[in-house]
Amino acid sequence: MPRSLLIISRQSPWSGPGAREALDIVLAGGAFDLPIGLLFLDDGVFQLAANQDARALQQKDLSANLQALPMFGVEDLFVCGDSAAERGLDPKALSLEEAQVLTVGEITALIDRYHQVITL
Amino acid sequence: MSTLHVLSHSPFGDDRLTSCLRVIGAEDALLLSGDAAYALQPGTAPFNTLGTRGLKLFVLAEDAQARDLQTPDWAKAIDYPAFVELSIRYDKVNSWL
Amino acid sequence: MKFAIALFSAAHAPSSRRALLFAQAALAGGHEIVRLFFYQDGVHNASGSVVTPQDELDLPRQWRTFVTEHQLDGVVCIAAALRRGVLNEEEAGRYQREAVAVAAPWELSGLGQLHDAVQDADRLICFGGA
């Protein structure tokens, strides 16, 4: 059985290539049909804020890639509800509807379930 | 399954330690490396938090030594061979990059 | 024990030195390193263009020596390397750039190599940040 990998994405979409490069690991894993999970934690939840405008910063739109995750076979998507709430985001109004909202305690259990983890 | 969490950022002005302490499990351990070793600066909020938290805590000996930080009796200073062994004793390593 | 070691920080970051010392200790302890994978700013560790002052630790050279001596599989993420201008001869030719920074023992390849290493290893250890 293939080993599972959890990516914990902690960076805002506008802090440099970090968020995109974390997502690239996830997409590559999906392309190889590997069991891969993605958790948005801390500033990473800003990647899921609605109505962002990448053009204002001459950037590519990350949210389009995020929406495509289920199509790439990545269905284990999670978001830390506490991180979102602390940052004034309604966990139920995030742009990635498929993402399960988890409590801090559930995140402990989530990390436990995966074989390996990368926190970026 | 157990996780060895590894921090390397200073706890002052960075939220990785706070975030890590929220999700760290009962079977897990924490290794302080690099500027994360400053969490062992006595009399500070991170020091007091870690001292009362009762978790398995390690610090990379070279980082404590370079920063003139004493290792309190609730932490253990380790070298690289011990770091390797820790990474085996725990089921996975979660480095907060 | 089989380790996959991933490095995410530039050569001048303390975490890059820690990655090397961990890797050396792992081999000295009788363990195996299935692959070193350099991602994000970690690609700079494979650069032959870094000039370190003589009295400072020359990490890119130490990595090169370490990988060569132990005949390790050292993979540099190609997308991260292109973005940061750390090209090998083939990529410099492809994109018509003058500077060639990476050569053997390093190999430029895709993120699939990271996943492949995770599947092959008992432990994935990441170094980066500060």
Image (cartoon, rainbow, N blue to C red):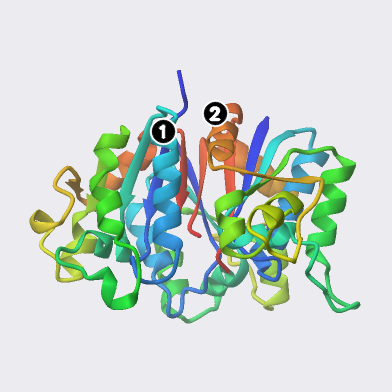
Which amino acid is tagged 1?
Ala
In the image, taking residue C47 as reference, residue C109 lies left or right, namely left
Residue B22, located in which quarter of the rendered image? bottom left
Q: Residue at x 48, y 58 (%)?
A: B96
Q: Secondary structure at mark 2?
A: helix
- Front-most of C4 and A98? A98
Residue visible at 65% across and 72% down in the picture: B70
Which sits in the foreground, A34 or A43? A34
- For the N terminus of chain B, the quadrant is top left
Residue C124, placed above or below residue C39: above
Is B91 placed above or below A106 here?
above
Residue A67 rendering spot, x and y as whole percentages: 23, 47
Residue A75, image x, y percentages: 26, 35
Q: Amino acid at mark 2?
A: Gln
Q: In this figure, which residue is indicated by the disc labeled 2? A: C119
Q: Which mark is residue A31?
A: 1
Q: Position of residue A93 (x, y in %)?
A: 9, 57
Which percent across, then down, holds residue C23? 74, 47
Q: Callout 1: few (<14), some (14-19), or many (20+) C-alpha neighbours within 10 Å? A: some
- Residue drawn at x 20%, y 48% as measured from the top left: A102
Q: Secondary structure at mark 1?
A: helix
Mark pair 1, 2: CA separation? 15 Å
- With respect to residue A104, does B71 lie above or below? below
Query: Which chain contains the residue that carries disc 1?
Result: A
For this view, does C70 lie left or right of residue A60? right
Residues tagged by mark 1 and mark 2 found on one chain of the structure: no
Q: Is residue C97 above or below residue C6?
A: below
Residue located 59% across and 37% down the image: C113
